[in-house]
Image (tube, helix red, strand yellow):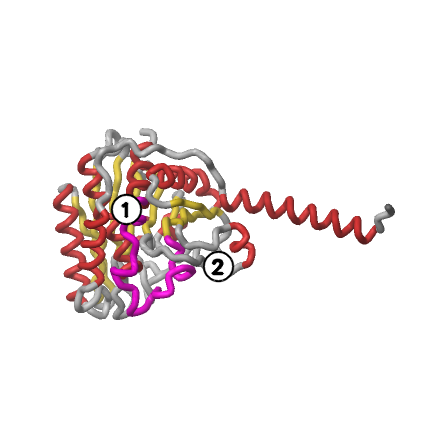
Amino acid sequence: MVISKSVKFFLLFTTFFIVLSIILGLIIRQPTFKKIPYNYSVKCDPQKLKEYVEYLSLLVPPRNHRFEKGLEETRNYIKNVFARYGDDIKIDEWSKEEIVFKNISLKIKGSNEKLIVIGAHYDVWGDFPGADDNASGVAGLLELARLFSVQKPPISVELVAYDSEEPPFMGSDLMGSFVHAKKLKESKKEVAGMVCLEMIGYYSESQPMLYTFMTILYPRKGDFIAVVGRYRDRKMARKFKQGINGALGVKALSYNGPKIIGVDLSDQRNYWNEGYNAVMITDTAFLRNPYYHSEKDLPETLNYQKMAGVVDGVFSTVLSLEK
């Protein structure tokens, strides 16, 4: 049988496209079969996560900068929970045009001063409850405080609840993470990296994607958590993916590539800008959660068992880090 030149060209082009797609897919997905076993008696409590989310989500007025009372109640709540598990609590304050901003942090000392930062923003968009965005991330932060009070980490951990992540502050120097990342750089501390907990509680039967190639690379079912970073963050992303998968509470996948589909739309962006490795751990936010930035982002829409798996995975990964 004689194959024409046009058919040969088509077959060659198709083969090249398939091979290139596989290579790019491997680079972006960073697949790994390794898991970090969860070897600790203490575990994240889904009921505590639910308690934290319900409190933060049902505040009246909400935790938005138009309502100082709601913000102050949120800050005091976070501070009081942190105080149950440690005393090295710090409040950083700054202001602009009579608007006061505050970060609340808890430092857990390891056997040396090498530091990893784990953060989540506590402010909410508009008048909405913000259960997933981002009471879920703050709840994870508060449970990590309890876990690290029982099992001390090999390196120091700073848990930071950030102010002013939501618009109109996103992308500005008023973001809580901008202020923290800048001060961290000025301190010249040795930093292992930063982990951003950004919406970790919503899981569903479908996983919409904005781009066709993402649909090819990732599952159609929204039952996973994503560990997201740039290509240079791939080792850190792979490590946390291994830890979450080893905790066996939820499946973790990763994305390491260009800043598309909102990859830089949270607090890790400010650590990237200061030269640090950082990853965002997320349920993919507006790609999956239909209640994003709405009055329906309520506590009952979240899966606290899977959230607990995420927290256990982050906890286990940090404990596996070298001194």
Residue type indicated by callout 1: Ala
Q: Mark 2 points at which residue?
A: 209
Q: Which residue is drawn at 33% across and 37% down?
A: 317
Q: Is mark 1 on a helix, strand or loop?
A: helix
Q: In which quarter of the image is residue 75?
A: bottom left
Residue 164 in view, yes or no: no
Q: Is mark 2 on a helix, strand or loop?
A: loop
Q: Which residue is drawn at 22% across and 33% down?
A: 41
Q: Is residue 39 above or below residue 29?
A: above
Residue 294 in view, yes or no: yes
Q: Which residue is drawn at 17% across and 68% down?
A: 60
Say which label, 1 or 2, has the lower sequence index.
2
Q: Which residue is drawn at 21% across and 48% down?
A: 142
Residue 71: assigned label: none
Q: In which quarter of the image is residue 57?
A: bottom left
Would you say the residues marked 1 and 2 are in contact, meaning their CB atoms lie under 8 Å apart? no
Residue 308: assigned label: 1
CA gap between label 1 and label 2 equals: 25 Å
Residue 274 rendering spot, x and y as whole percentages = 38, 47
| Range shown magenta | 283-309
Residue 282 rendering spot, x and y as whole percentages = 37, 52
Residue type indicated by callout 2: Met
